[in-house]
Every structure is written in C-alpha cells, then in structure tokens.
Image (spheres, helix red, strand yellow):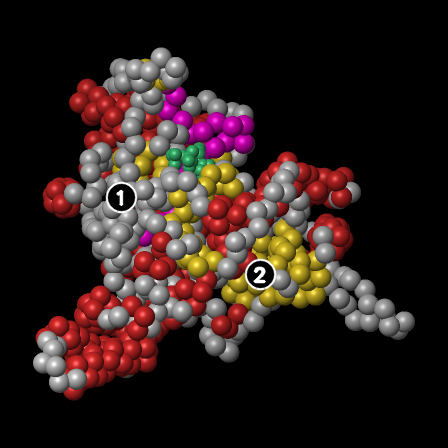
Amino acid sequence: MEERNTDRINVAEIFGENVFDDRTMQERLPKKIYQKLKETIREGREMDLETADVVAHEMKEWAIEKGATHYTHWFQPLTGVTAEKHDSFISAPQPSGKVLMSFSGKELIKGEPDASSFPSGGLRATFEARGYTTWDCTSPAFVREDASGATLCIPTAFCSYTGEALDQKTPLLRSMEAINQQSLRLLRLFGNTTSRKVTPSVGAEQEYFLIDRENFLARKDLVYTGRTLIGAMPPKGQEMDDHYFGAIRERVAAFMRDVNNELWKLGVTSKTEHNEVAPAQHELAPIYEEANVEVDHNQIIMETLKKVAYRHGLQCLLHEKPFAGVNGSGKHNNWSLVTDDGINLLDPGKTPHDNIQFLLVLCCILKAVDRHAELLRESAADVGNDHRLGANEAPPAIVSIYLGEQLQDVLNQLISTGSATHSIAGSRMDTGVKTLPDFMKDATDRNRTSPFAFTGNKFEFRMVGSEDSIGEPNIVLNTIVAEAFCEVCDELEKAEDFDLAVHDVIKKLAMDHQRIVFNGDGYSDEWVEEAKRRGLTNITNMLDAIPALTSASTIEMYEKFGVFTETELRSRAEIEYEIYAKKLNIEAKTMRDIIRKQVIPAVIGYTTTLATSITAVKAAGVGADVSTQSQMLKEVSQRLSETKDALEALEKVTDEANTHEDQVQRALYFRDHVVPAMANLRTPVDELEMLVDKSAWPMPSYGDMIFEV
Ligand code: ADP
Ligand code: MG
C-alpha cells in the first residue's frame, strides 16, 4: 500500500514557478529590454540580437537557479510527438580550468538540429539535412524537472533550410495571424475601433487510460503499438456506466495529485479531472488560453501524464483505442475568438436574435465548416482514430454542427422570414425539493453525439484523437473561419447600406449552409442516410481523408492566407501516407510475433496438458468418462489450426505490402489487405483466450488490465 501523501500543496505559490513568464521577465529584465520583448510578442516584430543576448543571459541565470544544467529547443515535428536536443550551458574551460556557463542570444534564437531523421515528405533532399529551430517568444520558456535533472525548454518552430514548415507551430502561428486580421476587419464593420488583436482561445480536454505498469510490460502489443492487438472482452465491461464520474480510487488520486502539482509548476492550468465512461479511463481539462500556448501545453500535459504514471508504477495510454470493445479516447478542442479587450466573438448574449455581429460570426462558421468539412475531418485523422471515427463509436465520421434549440430556432426564423425577432429563454429549474436551490437552466441542452457542437460561447470540436497534436485542427479552424470572414468583409465593406446588406448576407449564409446543422442523434443509422441525402461526406478512414489536404479549394485558401504553400501541403500528405504504412507495418509485425512466439506455444502447451490428462485417465483403467477433455481438446485444436492459417495469411499480405515502393499504394494495400487479415487472425485467438486455462495464457487479460488499477 502506498503511503498517503498529506503534504499540502500551495497552488498560488507554486503556480508557474518553473516558467519564464511575464512576471519573471518583468522582474529580471532591464526595463528597456522587457519593453522591446513585449513589443515583439505583441506586434510580431523581429528581434534584434542585442535584445536576444540580454534575454538569453537572464533566462540562463534564472534556469540555473532552478537547477538547470542543459537547455533544449523544444519543437513539434510531424511525428506527432515533441522533439528536443539537449545542450549543456557549459562552455570551453578557462585557462584556470574553471568552466563558465553561457547562453547567447544566437543560441536562444536559433538551433540547428540534424533534421534528416524527421519526416519532411520530400521537402529536404537527404544530402540537405539542415533544419532550423527558431524561438517562438509568444510561448514562454520553462524548466522541466525529470530524472535527468532540470532542463530549460525553449518552445521553437522548426523549418527546413529553404524556409518550409516542418512542424505544427509555424503554420499555426501563420493561421493565428490570418484569423486576427480578418476578425479585426469584421469588428471594425460593427464600429469597434478599440480592440487591437483577436486571438483564438483553445481549451483541450484530454482523455487517457491508466493501467498497472507490470501489466503493460507483459503486453508486447501495448509496448510496441500502444494498443492491444488481441484480447477477449471481460465478463463485465462498461455496461454498468458505474465508472463515469465515479469516485476516484486512491492510487489514481495520488497520481492525479502529482500530475496537477507538476502541471501547475509549469503554468498549465489543470482544472478538472474525472473518471470517464470506460473503466480505467480518465480525463483532464485545463482552463482555455491562447491557441498557440494551449497547443504547447497539451503536449506538456501528455508528457507529464506519461512521466508521472511511470513514477507511480502505472502506465498512461494515450492511444485512441487501446482496448477493442471498450470506449476509446479523444480530445475535445474547445475553440472561440477573443479580443485583447475581452470580447468573445462567439458569445451570443441573452438575446442572440438581435446580436447581429454574433449571427454573422455564427453564419460564417456554418459556411466555413460546410465548405471545408473534409479538411476538418482530415485534421483529426490519424491511425489510431480510425478505430473511433466511423467505427461505431463517438463521434461519427460525418462532420455536422450542433447548435441547440435556441440558436436553431433563431436560424429557422432567419431562413423563413429573413429576420429573427425573438430568442427562446432558459427556464427555471425546479427540482421539487425545497432545500435544493432553484436555478436557471441554460437555454440549450447538451448533445454528446455531435462532432462540432456549440456549447454556450465556444465550439467544441470532438473528433480529435487523444494522441494527436491539437495543432492541425486549430490551423484548420483558424483558416477556414478567416476565409469566411474575409469574404463577408469584402462584400460588406463595399455596401452602401450596411444594416440592409448584413441582413441579406446573414440570411443567405444561413440558407446556403443549413445542411451542415444537425441537432439529432449522431450515432443513429438514420443520420448516415440523412447525411447522404444532404450531400455531406462520411469519411470512415484516414487514407480517404488525406486527399482533402491537397484539394484545389484547400490549396487556394491556404496560399491566400499564407498558412501553407502547395509544396508544404503535398509534403504533409506524403508524410501521412508514410506514417500510416509504417504504423500498420509495426502492428502487423507485432501481432505476428506475439501469436507465433507466445500464443501458439501456450496453446500447444495446454493441448498437451489436455491430451496427457485423457491418456492418464484412460490408463487408470476405471472406464472414467473423458468426453469433456476430448471435447475441449477438439475445440482448442480447431481454433489453433484456424489461428495458424490466419497467421500465415497475415504474414503473406504483410510481406506483399512491403514490396510496394509507392507510398500511397503501400498505405492502401495495408488498409485493404493487412487490416482485414489482422481482424481475421484476432477472431480465433480471442476465442482461444476464452477456452484456455487462464494460468496458461501468456499475457494479462482485458479484465486484469482495466479493472485492477
Ligand atoms: P463543457 O462542460 O462544455 O465541456 P467546461 O467548462 O468543462 O465545458 O470546459 C471545457 C473546456 O473548454 C475547458 O478546457 C475550458 O477551459 C474550455 N473553455 C471554456 N470556455 C471557453 C472559451 N470561451 N473558449 C475556448 N475554450 C473554452
Ligand atoms: Mg466537453
């Protein structure tokens, strides 16, 4: 039993203590330098070397006080995880033999990792291995503590020698600039002259599984691929719904306490935590912040969950579907647009029907999502997410928008009469119990099945996979909405009568894009049919989503707003095909391995036990009945032979897949031949797990893993 940690945590004291944040900079930097840095951050100006030198020096001194010996440019290449290369602060020894700790402005601003091993999708020829990381001063540096000591981490962007983006951050920053400019145009139309900047605010709710580390290590499929490739369902699954919001167990509570502590020190506002639907599944949500910082923080959250789990003898699984038949994990990307003076463009107010600016923003979002639904779907596509989206699980693969009763009603008024005159109000909640206070209900209930839902004053994009970066979905959201804003501004800036024109625009947008709105049950078969009638796409797997990255409308939009060049988009598509084939190759090889080397020998061992028992009983010569043993032996042998056939079939198609030189063909072959072969192999193996003596089965079962944390 672990000892209970009763030390009090003083949140106010530790919050952000390991972050080189505004407070610290103000304290430590000379006033002039601080001002210059703030200008750079605020206005996106280039930084001069002199300023950088002073900032670097102070950053180093601060980091060393925190115990740091090394620094790293911390970046997000297209592998989906963060990358870093550590350098120590030590410079060449003095003649006296003493070493100095140094860190220059140049080292702060620019790093040069050997980039040849990061995916570039043909953007870098192999002889040209240069890649540059450049400091993103809009996301604060931090000191991370782990087993290797403390390291100063500097959030950076990652580009090729010729300036193409090789990461998530660069295009994200570009898309934030696009939405900023277009939102300001829109605000000016409504007479706002005071707001100076509009930033997308993002809060990402993170789901994950927690299992015992010993069980994890005993499952090579989890170790190599992050998910179980075989495994029979336990007698009790999630059908009781007794885990959801259930009391958090002690061991998990101790883990969460540590996670919060670590995150708070790093300035991450971990706010809510609760159990999720599936056993052993949990969720963590921070308080929303600027998109760029939130993307970094979500990476820090994922890293911290893994690191702290390890310390507690646990393993954190971030895969979208670690256990077949059990709820998968996703990420809810909450998104809104907020001005520097605190106005949320997505706040409908109490009476949305007469909030013309809000209605225009809303209708622009309908247009953006309707027009670029496939690109939005693509932004959530990854290998693991194929087991969720379109695979009979939340949310469906069809992109649609949930507005709720109140906004739907306003939209209906707009469409039928051209203007909206009233809004449905929330009513009083009466529990019928005197001692419970009455309160006002929201005007709109929730819908849990929608992939893109309006929730009060933000949209919640729920397709994103648990393991994926939220970078891409936010790049897409920012840019598609910037495009829609841009188009209405082009029209309205020319209008002679603004009030008249804006009404017409809103009505037209509402009419043209109402097909994307759906308030019903997104899990139902009727919706699949209905969506087809409406002409909405239903993309059920990652490979079918990739072409949206390079469609004519995507390229045109991204080039117009300077977010991606066509070359960058083509390289990204190429990388995705490559990643798909690589991950499936690993899955197939792992499955072959564990079945050939672990499952089959174990089953043979068990059949030997059965056969020996039959012979022994018979030899006893008392005429005892051996029909049960014989029957079992027959059944097990039958499945064993099916397993062997299916294994050979999988080996054949995997080898065949790897003969394809062309990445697209290779990926498609994996999807169409290897994935089904893996499913065929799984069936007899899972049946065997139910037949074979538990003590003979060579790895922990689903029950062992998800009920015994
Ligand atoms: P819900 O119950 O709708 O899921 P929560 O209050 O739990 O809402 O918030 C979910 C996430 O959304 C949190 O990370 C929260 O910080 C974030 N969030 C709340 N308001 C906004 C907003 N205006 N813009 C972006 N994210 C937001
Ligand atoms: Mg939510």
Q: In x, y percent, where is residue 633?
A: 16, 77
Q: Can residue 108 be seen at all in this image of the molecule?
A: yes
Tag 1, which secondary structure? loop
Q: Is residue 174 left or right of residue 623?
A: right
Q: Quadrant of residue 479?
A: top left
Q: Residues within 10 Å of mark 1 (few under 14, many from 20)?
A: few
Seen as rendered, the residue at the extreme right is 96
Q: Amino acid at mark 1?
A: Met
Q: Is residue 682 depicted above or below 342 in this figure?
A: below
Q: Amino acid at mark 2?
A: Thr
Q: Which residue is mark 1?
A: 240
Q: Residue at x 67, y 66 (%)?
A: 87
Which numbered disc covers residue 133? 2
Q: Can residue 109 be seen at all in this image of the molecule?
A: no
Tag 2, which secondary structure? strand
Q: Residue at x 62, y 55 (%)?
A: 144
For this rendering, which residue is in front, 36 or 273?
273
Q: Is residue 613 depicted above or below 257 in this figure?
A: below
For this rendering, which residue is in front, 688 or 620?
620
Which range of residues does the magenta coloring cover? 328-351
The C terminus - image quarter: bottom left
